[in-house]
Amino acid sequence: MEKVNITINGRKISATAGSTILRAAQQAGIDIPTLCNHPALTPIGVCRICLVEVKGMPALQPSCTSLVIEGMEVQTETPPLVEARKFILDMLFSERNHFCMYCEMSGNCELQNLGYRYGLDHWVYPTYTRRFPIDATHRHLLLEHNRCVLCRRCIRSCSDLTANHTLDLRERGIESMVQADTNVPFGDSSCISCGGCSQVCPTGAIFDKRSAYMGPDKKLEQVQSTCSQCSLGCGMKVFTRADSVVRVEGDWDAAVNGGRLCKKGRFDPLDEERRRVTRPLLRRRGGLEPATWEEALQAVAERMGVARAQDIGVLASSRLTNEALYQLKELFRQGMKVTNVGLLNGAAPKALGKPQGALADIQKSDLILVVGADPVKDQPVASFLVKGSVDRGARLIVVDGKENGLSAFAHQRLEMADLDKAQDMAQRATNPVVLYGPGVPEKAAQSLKKLSPKAAFVALEPGVNTRAAAAFGFDNGFKVPAAKVLYLLLGEQHSGGEDLLKGAPKDAFLVVQASYESPLTLRADAVLPAAIWSEQAGTLTNTEGRLLKINRVLEPRGEAKPDLEIISLLGKKLGKKLAASLDDISARAAQELK
Amino acid sequence: EVNKSGLRGRGGAGFPTGMKWEFTRRAPGEEKFVICNADEGEPGTFKDRLILEGDPHKLIEGMEIAGYAIGSQKGYIYIRGEYDLSIRRMQKAIDQARQSNLLGKNILETGFSFDLEIKKGAGAYVCGEETALIESLEGKRGNPRLKPPYPVTHGLWQKPTLVNNVETLANVPEILFHGSDWFRKFGTEKCPGTKVFTILGHVETPGLIEVEMGTPLREIVFSFGGGVRGGKRFKAALLGGAAGVFLSEALLDVRMDFESLKENKAVLGSGAVLVMNEDASIPDMLLSILKFFAHESCGQCTPCRVGTHQLLDLADQCRQGRGSEVQLERMVNVSKAMVATSLCPLGQSLIMPVKSAVDNFRGDFLNHGNPAGKTPG
């Protein structure tokens, strides 16, 4: 990598060619103040706080956009620069409502931090002379224009990271305002609630309604984990306080999503309205009654113990971790010789084999072929990457029904019968990417294989940990009628309801392991309370085949236990020898998943 | 020839035209553009209108020559939306030129192709700034871009683009026809040629004049302008439009060219000369100018977006008779800070009217509304 020699504040620094003065300074540990700059967004140099002195240039230069040049001599904190920054902060603080005392972002605000840094302690100029509206129409986000510093981070996040282009500016000069679409209420706009804007906003202009009043970041605990709402496995940071989840943010350093999150990962988990199952339940004398774990597991083990292998059926949700699925396989397929095992949701066609491409290929692609998958609905962050690529000139061809969410952004939409036309176009591209899902018929999948190795293939698996489930043999076709003892591991999944048990023998013993109450738990003979996403540790295999870590954030509610623990305890009751420690199981699972 | 002529931009900045053409010609890239900046947004200026309405073919010729020089085949004339007649006449001239094979493909069988299109502005002074103009042409918000890179290398659609003022381009055909030596016969050593000045305000004969660069201001006001109307006394002249400078009687003998004015802490700008008589109120004038800037600030950068409004408030206080040394000092300081930190020349130019008004007419600010001269308590 080519290096450029510059001097910052008298220090000789070897910077990477093509980087900005700001980047070079940050890498050398020199702190230049910024406001509109954000490492994940394109710099625009409008707040003017990061201005630096460059020898030989009469004008001050914005360090966030100025590229390093060999021999450059930069000063970052001279008295004139400090005066300039104080001026800009005086202007900002007087422009709109920046009374820190009344703001829930106090303590978490980049503008406030700058004020402290430069010793602002009183207003010099007439302040807050213009009133702007507050838009509280959005379900999750509050848009408080009076705290906006017009840094445009939200607009850049919406266009660069999410590629949804909902936010933009309206009016000119002092009347400039962020707007949603053509000045429609935020809640009525094309916003898809990814929350990226709230994550990048430096002040309290856009924030998440729920977490805003729950205290500044320094009072919260932070745990890094992986989202388990879809098969992408976006990296996230979970903030908690007093044993509750307060906020979920995208992890900027995560390879899968680069800081992006969608509504499913950021807001839905905190919006849960279903009731938790917190105690084991057994059906006695016709009704479900609370029981101890000992009693519940004993009852289940007894019924399983006396049944023949072919009478037992195991149906797992793809939400289970690698470890839980591995243990389940060890116990039932290996230990109990049960063959009637299945997965609660379908999988992408096997014909396309092991993963070949990665999500990152979407961003490098000049032609994206989406076949039988709807990421807008099922893996939103993948759809952000697709739309972002289209913005940069990539061609998008969707081979699916009209209702596919990407149809509106596609250059062409074709029916599955015309797949060969799409393949021709992909063949002529330079870096084609094929995103495929469960909607691809096996025959079409065979045909698609012809595009390899030119095209990168990225599966968009339905469910969550579908890849691991398939690898452990849980997609062999489960048959309900065959089972006399049914073990359903629902996890947090919204159950299929009564349909799931159509055809089940009337006297079948139904064991439901779930986190939430549902028609299935009400019908069960034994209910085993399972921990949710934030209450267990383990790993997931995402749709790219990447192994991602989930870390425990909270203690399980009530008497709920992680799926893995329940399976292990059941195994003990059934007299089977199984691996015990989480690390041991993780290692074995990882080994088998290679 | 253009280089030798020493022609300098007539839009206000005065950048050597030949040098700008050279940069654009040398910039790498197959596709290049010529843009004529006919936004004429500077208050008090209507000199370009004269050419757009009265001699449009001269402009077309100038743009074609520029296109030939830099290697461009497409030009745009960005005319302010309010200039209805200019737009119609310019379009008619373009149509006529096309018909006579003086514009379009293979002009006069020379193998050189060049075509022109008119684009209308939509009422933003900031779009007179070349990069904001380009953003506007691209269909985006008229926000100035960060410079570097400059339009000569990264302009319209990030391609090398030459942006010149109407008057600048109108000088080109004459220079080529008569030669650069002829052009240098007019004006001064460093500012050759002629300049179209807009005389307005309290004069007998307001209007447009074309005189040699370096003509003294006194001659412009009293000879061509006919002197102060109704026999009143001269008080001040605002030179260069809103982004201009208040000159007092003391400087009436200054020569009107880029260098002489710079030496006298003044500025030529677009060549507007607004004359004010003894009854005029400098604080009122300044307030009017500041209102203009506050309204026209694009809002991109903090110093200008808020600074223009704080200046407005300070000037208003002076106008209401609450002026004091502290207020004046603050106005100048804010303007200075805006020079240091603003993203584009709009924010950087407030210092000119503010400082010149305060320096040359200090008393007016402190005593406004107080003829007796008592300073407010």
Image (cartoon, coloured by chain):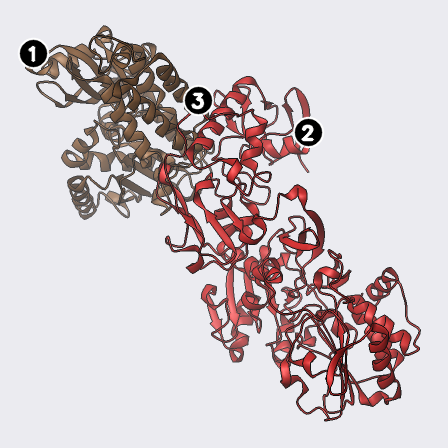
Chain colours: A red, B brown
Q: Residues within 10 Å of mark 1 (few under 14, many from 20)?
A: few
Per the image, the residue denoted by label 3 is B337
- Horizontal side of A512 relative to B349 (left or right) equals right
Q: Mark 3 belongs to which subunit? A: B
Judged from the image, the secondary structure of the residue bearing numbered disc 3 is helix
Spot the residue most to the left.
Answer: B230
Amino acid under disc 1: Gly
Residue A260 position in % (x across, y down): 60, 54
Residue A497's label in the rendered image is none
Amino acid under disc 2: Ser
Are discs 2 and 3 less than 8 Å apart at CB?
no
Q: Nearer the viewer, residue B268 or A217?
A: A217
Q: Quadrant of the C terminus of chain A?
A: bottom right
Residue at x 90% of width, y 71% of height = A578
Q: Residues within 10 Å of mark 2 (few under 14, many from 20)?
A: some
Q: Nearer the viewer, residue A412 or B71?
A: A412
Q: Nearer the viewer, residue A277 or A431?
A: A277
Seen in the picture, residue B167 relative to A402 is either above or below; the reply is: above
Q: CA distance from mark 1 to mark 2?
A: 70 Å
Per the image, the residue denoted by label 1 is B231
Per the image, the residue denoted by label 2 is A14
Q: CA distance from mark 2 to mark 3?
A: 32 Å
Amino acid under disc 3: Ala
**Picture quadrant where residue A117 is located:** top right
Judged from the image, the secondary structure of the residue bearing numbered disc 2 is strand
Residue B188 position in % (x across, y down): 27, 12
Residue at x 67% of width, y 34% of height = A27
Residue A437 position in % (x across, y down): 62, 72
* Of the image marks 3 and 1, the number of the one nearer the N terminus: 1
Q: Mark 2 belongs to which subunit? A: A
